[in-house]
Amino acid sequence: MRIFETIDVRKFEDESFLSDALANASNFRKKKYEAINNHLGKLQVIANTYLLDKCLKELGLHERDMEYIVEKNGKLRFANEPDVHFNLSHSKNMSLAVVSDEPVGCDIQFIDKVDEKLYDLVLSEEEKKYVVGASCTSPEERFYKLWAMKEAIIKKDGSGLRDRLTDVHDDNVYIEKIVLSDKEVTEKYIIAII
């Protein structure tokens, strides 16, 4: 079982939406929200909390009832629901939450310009060929697909950044592109879940 949800964090600029999300949040997540000093960061944290609660509700659970344990590598888990695993991510105006019955990792990346110096730090030789090769998608989109895949893998096993990101790869990662559009701006994101 794997449940995931995404949301545009700007929805939480609506005071009633924000207050409802905070009212249903655990003390752990409320403290995290209150500790953030910038507007976008606060929106991202409460959006992740809201999404986590939404996913948990499908299992008959509520985020506000969760007791968190921070493992030595910084990965969070539920003390009172050890068989429920979760992972959270955010990038610019989007947040992502995943809940699963097995260890899970996820990442979301805003598709933006890429400093090509990152290629050598992140990509294997085969991946570099894929990114710069001819395709109907942009090199940036192909790069962020790989970046999000690598982040999701690392977050799943809780290992943190590895010495060689170039060696991190798994073809079993779920990848999806999400497009946010309003009258003024279109934003593209890649999500990865494993």
Image (cartoon, grey):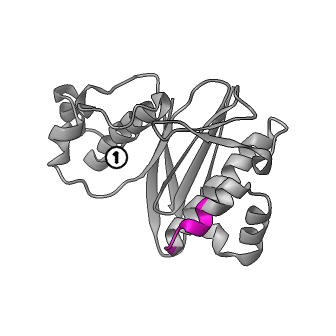
The number of callouts visible is: 1
Q: Is residue 139 visible?
A: yes
Tell me if 189 is positioned left or right of 46 in this view: left
- Of residue 101 and residue 75, the one placed in the foreground of this image is 75
List x then y, in percent, for residue 137: 33, 44
Residue at the image position 37 percent from the left and 54 percent from the top = 111
In the image, residue 142 sits, relative to residue 163, either above or below, namely below
In the image, residue 73 sits, relative to residue 88, either above or below, namely above
Residue placed furthest toward the front = 72
Residue 151 drawn in magenta = no
List x then y, in percent, for residue 62: 80, 46
Choose top left, top right, bottom left or bottom right for residue 26.
Answer: bottom right
Choose top left, top right, bottom left or bottom right for residue 49.
Answer: bottom right
In the image, residue 174 sits, relative to residue 38, either above or below, namely above
- Of residue 168 and residue 127, the one placed in the foreground of this image is 168
Magenta segment, which residues? 32-38
List x then y, in percent, for residue 166: 23, 30
Residue at the image position 74 percent from the left and 57 percent from the top = 25
- Of residue 155 and residue 191, the one placed in the foreground of this image is 155
| Amino acid, disc 1 | Glu
Residue at the image position 53 percent from the left and 68 percent from the top = 36
Q: Residues within 10 Å of mark 1 (few under 14, many from 20)?
A: many
Q: Is residue 136 visible?
A: no
List x then y, in percent, for residue 159: 40, 31
The residue tagged 1 is 141
